Amino acid sequence: MEDKKKILLCEDEENLGMLLSEYLEAKNYETHLCKDGEEGYKDFLKNKYDICILDVMMPKKDGFSLCRDIKTVNPEMPVIFLTAKALKEDVIDGFKLGADDYITKPFSMEELTYRIDAILNRVNGKKKQEDAVVHLGKYVFDRQRQTLSLNDDHRKLTTKENELLNMLYQHANDVLLRELALNKIWEDDNRVYARSMDVYITKLRKYLKGDKEVEILNVHGEGYKLVIPEKDAR
């Protein structure tokens, strides 16, 4: 079951804040309501959120100031502003701070959830794309496009090569058991496929020979170990 997305909601109008919080909870969002900007910032520092919804006009710390502080801590945090101010200058100021959306009051709660979903889908899509690309020392391994690149040299990997290198990367600097790789990639553990995997390991070693800090070691009686710089490991 997918975890609930967590929302930091900062709204000083008590009735609206409670109404929004209850509505978002009913839509399966875990929502934390704060009644001023200072409380919101303290809460942001203590918890992990997927998106922040900030009223612009709040006591102690306004929404623009809160957004600036949040973006200092996490520049990638999605932010939606809620405001009664519809002046063009205010909207521009909000977007300059890095806001993803700007909704003027009164607004439809259904529209708000659609906008939240659209932003989170975009952010999650971007994350998945970024997660597909990893570094193995000097090499760039694109697990989605099945390529292994060193500078301007780009090698297209076969599906089996890609799957095996990906499993080695997931166990980087640790042992990948032969049986696990055989069962996951070849869905078998007999000797025919074991010999086939040895051939693929030999190919991957050849592909990675351009960086002395990267190597695939045999671990006798257990399997293989992909050795890469610690900074590149998962």
Image (spheres, helix red, strand yellow):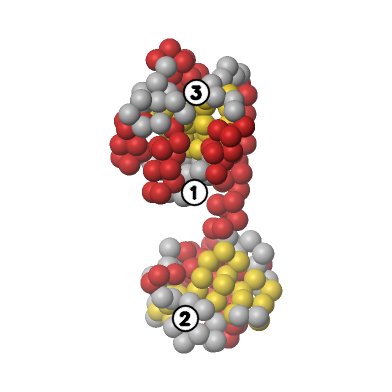
Residue 3 can be seen in this image: no
Residue 171: name its quadrant: bottom left
Q: Tell us which disc is closer to us: 3 or 2.
A: 3
Q: Amino acid at mark 2?
A: Val
Alpha carbon distance from label 2 to label 1:
31 Å
In front of the other: 21 or 165: 21
Instruction: Work out whether 2 lies above or below 233.
Output: above
Q: Secondary structure at mark 2?
A: loop
> In whole angstroms, how far apart are the C-alphas of marks 3 and 2?
48 Å
Residue identified by numbered label 3: 24
Residue at 57% x, 17% y is 106
Residue 116, placed above or below residue 68: above
Place of residue 89 in the rendered image (x, y in percent of width and height, measured from the top left):
58, 34
For mark 2, does the 10 Å Cα neighbourhood hold few (<14), some (14 to 19), or many (20 or more) residues?
A: some
Q: Position of residue 36 (x, y in %)?
A: 35, 26
CB contact under 8 Å: marks 3 and 1? no
Q: In the rendering, which numbered label is found on residue 3?
A: none
Q: Which residue is mark 2?
A: 214
Can you name the residue that lies furthest to the top here? 15
Q: Nearer the viewer, residue 3 or 47?
A: 47
User: Tag 1 or tag 2, which sits nearer the N-term?
Assistant: 1
Mark 1 sits on what residue? 76
